[in-house]
Amino acid sequence: MRRKFSIAAVGATLALGLAACSGGGAGSSTDDASGAAGGDGGGQLVGVAMPTQTSERWIADGDAVKAGLEEAGYKVDLQYGNDDIPTQQSQIDQMITKGVKLLIIASIDGTALANQLQAAADADIPVIAYDRLIRDSENVDFYVTFDNYNVGVQQATSLLVGLGVLDEAGTAVEGVTGPFNVELFAGSLDDNNAHFFWKGAMDTLQPYIDEGVIVVPSGQTDIEQAATLRWQQETAQKRMEDLLTSTYGGGSKVDGVLSPYDGLSRGIITALQNAGYGPTRSDATPMPVVTGQDAEIASVKLIADDVQFSTIFKDTRKLADQAIVSGTSFLAGEEPEANDTETYDNGVKVVPSYLLTSDIVYANNIQALLIDSGYWTAEQVEKGQA
Ligand code: BGC
């Protein structure tokens, strides 16, 4: 379905300029060398709905999208939903009432926005799902995200590297057969991404589980058992504490934990440290291999300090830029360019998508991936604070 917009065209040069525009890193200021300033957005209003401010990545995403759109001459109504579904629903309702010409939405619960999206469709407002797919609605026009299945593959791969089963090039290391005790964590089940991360990770780990190289002593190998509602750190800490008590009471040790997000990883690490592991990976009872996602600054410091083993870097500046490029295409009455038209079925239709790539961060490439790219400064990594 293609809708018609009575909106002044935004020049192709603008979209191209934005493609080169850094949207500002996590905690870093916008570095705009693109010449996109003074774009001709004509002051049209764009609604940007983000899920929460409890994770710094969403703050960076929101700031970057807002800065890039304003640079291009749009007005922006940026709202954070406080991880509360009714709050996000009413924020989007209000954006529609205010007359936004485009909605960019990172949902809290990907299945809870069908009414809002119907209202947007009725008002001819195009909707871009930002990083998280909005499900069960035909009124999602585009999706900008990362290759989420591959993020899961990368998380599991880094776990295997940490255990010594693979080297960093992904090659099997001779004679490392375990068995390694691993526990598994997943994200929030109402977030479509959580399922992609889990599938990518489990497809990667399953052969090692089948061979007995990896064992999951708790037996909790279903996503429902491993899930963490709303991606909450305290929930993960509590589950790790419970696992340590229920499963590791008799002296057996945890060797690795698959964690899909840095906030969860910090909760898991706290539970492990409180139970006598670590504090680092080189102590007598070493901190197990703990993975992550998002390259949050507190976790990057933990990686530099040999506490957390790895994280996945998804450059939110690039995602913000992509959302702006796709959004300005809609506002110019054009279809945004997709690079995937097969993967993201939202239950009603396959949503055309633009997928970006991600990288595994280990202690030895923090400099190259995060500092040299300007995502974090060396001082921020040293302090563990933005
Ligand atoms: C995002 C991740 C993030 C998680 C928790 C997911 O939808 O893709 O980057 O770690 O939400 O905020």
Image (tube, rainbow, N blue to C red):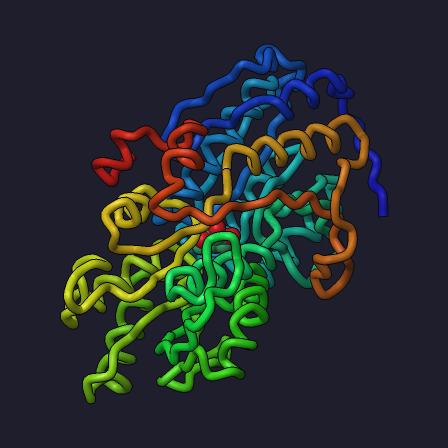
Query: On the picture, is 246 further left or further right than 12?
Result: left
Q: Position of residue 275 (x, y in %)?
A: 16, 72
Q: Is residue 191 visible?
A: no
Q: Position of residue 351 (x, y in %)?
A: 74, 52
Which residue is pictured at 50% across the width and 25% down the height? 67
Query: On the picture, is 41 further left or further right than 7?
Result: left
Residue 237 lies in quadrant:
bottom left
Q: Where 236 falls versus 46 (above or below)?
A: below
Q: Where 183 falls versus 266 (above or below)?
A: below
Return the residue nearer the eye: 312 or 62: 312
Report the quarter where the C terminus lies. Answer: top left
Residue 232 lies in quadrant:
bottom left
Return the residue nearer the eye: 172 or 386: 172
Q: Position of residue 271 (x, y in %)?
A: 22, 68
Q: Position of residue 241 (x, y in %)?
A: 24, 75
Which residue is pictured at 28% across the width and 36% down the height? 381
Query: On the picture, is 369 further left or further right than 119?
Result: left
Q: Is residue 43 visible?
A: yes
